[in-house]
Image (spheres, grey):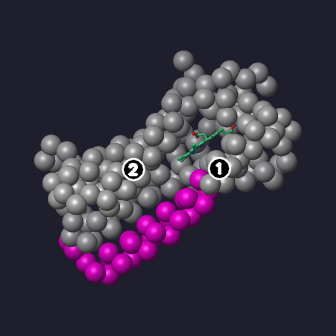
Amino acid sequence: MQLRDNGLRFSPITIVLHWVVVILLLSIIGLGIALSQSVDDAQKLEYSHLQNLLGTILFCISIYRFWARITSYHPLPLGTPNPVEVIASRSVAAALALAMVLLPLAAWLTKCAAGETVGLPGGWAIPAPFGPSVEAHHLFGILFKTGATAFLAGLALHIFGALKSHLILKNDALKRMLGKHVEL
Ligand code: HEM
């Protein structure tokens, strides 16, 4: 099995992890919405523990993914795209991969600074590296919000690029990321 991306194609690991990250991200956002709507404290705690668990899994996968992205070749683009677009789209993809390492970290540090226990299902908890602090809470809160806003803008651009390739340019970029074998 091809373990790393090369100039000709993405590895199956890259493809599977890309969509696992999309599912994890959507689940974390969905749990955040459910948390804000719920009025039952026990249910809120359950959602929050599940969200912390998914965030931890996302963080671990993303460390590997960011390392793999910056240490392997990115497959050649399909069609004859403008070089500026290629550089921009690859930079956005690498930034999205990095954001998936930094945002869970910032969310964890924000909760620790607020004095919240970062609980996991089954009664487990992630230990806090420091105690509650108003200043640290403020700082990590700002970093998280700024990072999340930049991430969402980058993600919108990334999805726009994928849809443009599929619907307007009618190339196989999206199908390649869904596992289709594309000859270059
Ligand atoms: C519905 C949402 C998404 C769609 C339709 C989508 C689509 C794509 C496509 C078509 C490519 C291949 C680009 C190429 O051929 O060079 C790609 C690559 C990539 N995407 Fe997404 N993407 C989505 C969500 C995300 C999210 C949430 C992230 C956040 C980490 C992300 C990060 C990346 C990265 C880092 C790459 C480069 C390959 C890799 O290292 O995994 N994408 N995406």
Query: Mark 2 sits on what residue?
Result: 30
* Label 2 CA crowd tier, 10 Å (few <14, some 14–19, many 20+): few
Q: Nearer the viewer, residue 18 or 90?
A: 18
At x 22%, y 60%, the residue is 39
Disc 1 under 8 Å from ligand 1? The reply is yes
Residue 131 at x, y percent in the picture: 20, 71
Q: Quadrant of residue 168?
A: top right
Helix, strand or loop at label 2? It is helix
Quadrant of residue 154 in the image?
A: bottom right
Q: Can the viewer see residue 56 in this picture?
A: no
From mark 1 to mark 2, how far is it between C-alphas? 21 Å
Residue 173 in sight? yes
Quadrant of the frame with the N terminus: top right
Which circle, 1 or 2, is nearer the viewer? 2
Q: Position of residue 143 (x, y in %)?
A: 45, 70
Give the prevailing secondary structure in the magenta stretch: helix
Looking at the image, the residue that sits furthest to the bottom is 135
Report the residue at 39% width, 50% height from top: 30
State whether residue 131 is above or below residue 98. below
Residue at screen point 49% across, 63% down: 148
Q: Magenta part of the protein: which range?
A: 131-155
- Look at the picture and state if 161 lies above or below 8: below
Q: Which mark is residue 158?
A: 1
Magenta span has 62? Answer: no
| Element marked by disc 1 | helix
Of callouts 1 and 2, the N-terminal one: 2
Nearer the observer, 36 or 17:
36
Towards the viewer: 153 or 43: 43
